Amino acid sequence: MLHTVNKSPFQANALLSCLRVVKKGSAILLIEDGVYGALVGTKATPTIQEAMKNSKVYALAPDLEARGIQDNVLKGVKTIDYGGFVDLVAEYDTVQAWL
């Protein structure tokens, strides 16, 4: 399953809710303000690092760049472009949007 999170972990619980139920082998894609969850040195950092042990974590590069945070992404979070987003949607049978 592909999980998409578009809310900042500092304003909503969408990322934490997602991480509580994500299953091994799933992928998490951070988009829009959700990309703040991919930053180094935040309260979300340990949770994302733990999630990366069992799931792939991606962040949408254009959203990182729009916020000027593309140089502060956690090691292990893969940045992708819109084409990569489409590829992920095609790769996974189910997409769960966390709003």
Image (tube, rainbow, N blue to C red):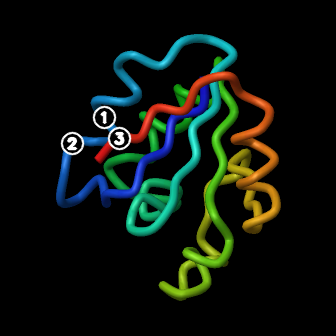
The answer to whether the residues at label 1 and label 3 have Cβ atoms under 8 Å apart is: no
Whole-angstrom CA distance, mark 1 to mark 3, is 10 Å
Amino acid type, residue under disc 3 in the picture: Trp
- Residue 51 placement, left or right of 85: left
Residue nearer the viewer, 11 or 3: 3
The residue drawn where x is 66% and y is 49% is: 58
Question: To which residue does mark 1 refer?
Answer: 16
Amino acid type, residue under disc 1 in the picture: Leu
Q: Is 45 above or below relative to 80?
A: above
Circle 1 Cα neighbour tier, 10 Å, few/some/many (<14 / 14–19 / ≥20): some
The residue drawn where x is 41% and y is 40% is: 97
Q: Looking at the picture, how far across and down is residue 71, in whole percent?
A: 66, 77
Q: Is 54 above or below relative to 79?
A: above
- Residue 5 placement, left or right of 74: left
The answer to whether the residues at label 1 and label 2 have Cβ atoms under 8 Å apart is: yes
Residue nearer the viewer, 31 or 38: 31
Circle 2 Cα neighbour tier, 10 Å, few/some/many (<14 / 14–19 / ≥20): some
Q: Looking at the picture, how far across and down is residue 9, in whole percent?
A: 29, 53
Q: Is 47 above or below relative to 86?
A: above
Residue 13 image label: 2
Whole-angstrom CA distance, mark 1 to mark 2, is 5 Å
Name the quadrant containing residue 59.
bottom right
Residue nearer the viewer, 57 or 48: 57
Q: Looking at the picture, how far across and down is residue 72, in whole percent?
A: 59, 71
Give the SS element for disc 1.
helix
Circle 3 Cα neighbour tier, 10 Å, few/some/many (<14 / 14–19 / ≥20): some
Amino acid type, residue under disc 2 in the picture: Asn
Question: To which residue does mark 3 refer?
Answer: 98
Name the quadrant containing residue 17.
top left
